[in-house]
Image (spheres, grey):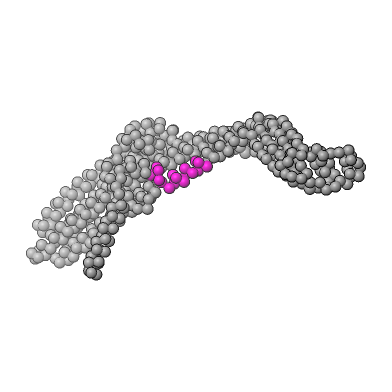
Amino acid sequence: MRRVAGYFITVFIIITSVMINSVAAETLTLQEAINLALENNSNLKAYYWSVQSQKEDYSAAKSNLYPKIRIEEKFIRTDNPTYGFMAKLNQERFTQEDFGVDNLNNPRDISDYQTSLSFEQPLFTPKLYHGINIAGGELNARNKDLDRMKNEVTRNIVRNALLIQTSKQFIGVSELALRDAQEHKRLAGLRYEAGLGLYSDVLRADAGIKNAEAEVARSEGDLEIAKRALGLLLGRSESVDINDERLILPLDDLTVYLDASIHREDLKALNERYENSINAVKMERSVFLPEVGIGGSYMLNDHKDPFSPEGESYIFTAFLRWSLFDASLYHKVKKAVADANEIKQRVSGLEQEIQFRVNEAYIRIREREKKVSLAKTALADSEEALRLVRTRYENSLAPLVDLLDTQLMLDNARAGLIKAENGYMNSIVDLYYQSGMLLKTLIAN
């Protein structure tokens, strides 16, 4: 029974392990990965709440235009002549005896429950209008910042997808190198057995196998890390694989990307903030204009009970407030102007940097395109060189060290081509990102 139980436990562990690995090895298309990242990426979700926060600020700024209504219940107990006189009048209990000099100078203790319902409604408040424009402008800027973050997350997804595909290619190259090393050991063993070679050649070839096996292990580790990095971008804790679908981003003339770059979301956001800085100057200057509004209150007064109408009255007010002189206001205006000039310079600087980045990315593409061509040539030459040296070694015309050196050159050439192709695709992705076209292009595809 123990053996049977142990058997079933072993089978259960194996099945569970397979299920876990199958979940961890979920394979997505690039489009699916991008869509999931836009929904679940932690940084995007965090900034989404920043946008929501600004929405509430905008709503709060607009609500300042609505009337403010308050209800208040207040209790006082006093023998103060002025307050006592006023309280009795408000309670409508004032009598002829209360005009006595003694009663006026030394009134008895009196209680007053005052219930008031009051309101205030601004009619003309320039500062509020500018404040609403500023809050709305910042909301627009944050939405554009969020769009730019989506482009950045998309770029990271694409880069990671390319890294996964490249890691798979490196595994293939490492396995080729391992097979070649095993073949070299076989040839060295045959020559040693035939009395034509040295045992040290067999050991040297065996060391080459161990190095090749280490490269395979390193490549497999790199692939697993790349998969987990993709999972992190998707808001997951497990690794996620990407299929081998080739990314196609056509390369157009440089002017296409320069024209598109002026519509980049972060540049739009900074322009929104510049407009906001202009509104901030207007808001600071608006304090020199009058404010007009109305207000009023309805009051109940009682000397025994709260919320009781022993006496009732109302007050209606219309007001005009005008700051005629405050030296600090002039400095606030100057500060707002300085802030606006700072942001204006930032806009100009960002425009120049964007143009530089687009040009840089385009130049890198041409450079890496040439590297891919050279890497292909180097690979073809290395393959032919290995073929020739292997033939010479088999015919005892070359030592094993020449064969191993040539094999190393071939391994480097294979890896170099993969790196060159990966660099080329990453440079195209960077060009689309710097021009602000990446997310739109991939969604359109």
- The answer to whether 101 is drawn above or below residue 180 in the figure is above
- What percent of the width, then of the height, locates residue 44? 44, 44
Most distant residue in the left direction: 194
- The answer to whether 137 is drawn above or below residue 169 in the figure is above
Q: Identify the residue at image location x=56%, y=35%.
A: 134
Residue 222, quarter of picture: bottom left
Tell me, yes or no, whether the highlighted magenta stretch contains residue 335. Answer: no
- The answer to whether 226 is drawn above or below residue 57 in the figure is below
The quarter in which the N terminus is drawn is bottom left
Relative placement, left or right, of 415 versus 114 is: left
Front-lying residue, 356 or 107 = 107
The quarter in which the C terminus is drawn is top left
- What percent of the width, then of the height, locates residue 353? 45, 38
- What percent of the width, then of the height, locates residue 342? 55, 38
All told, the count of numbered labels is: 0
Q: Identify the residue at image location x=52%, y=42%.
A: 53
* Magenta portion: prevailing SS class: helix
Relative placement, left or right, of 43 versus 313 is: left
Q: Is residue 292 visible?
A: yes
Most distant residue in the right direction: 101
Specify the segment rendered in magenta: 37-53
Q: Is residue 344 visible?
A: no
Most distant residue in the bottom direction: 2
Tell me, yes or no, whether the highlighted magenta stretch contains residue 46. Answer: yes
Front-lying residue, 92 or 329 = 92
Residue 293, quarter of picture: top right
- What percent of the width, then of the height, locates residue 238? 35, 53
Front-lying residue, 298 or 369 = 298
Q: Identify the residue at image location x=41%, y=46%.
A: 41
Q: Identify the residue at image location x=50%, y=41%.
A: 52
Relative placement, left or right, of 137 versus 151 is: right
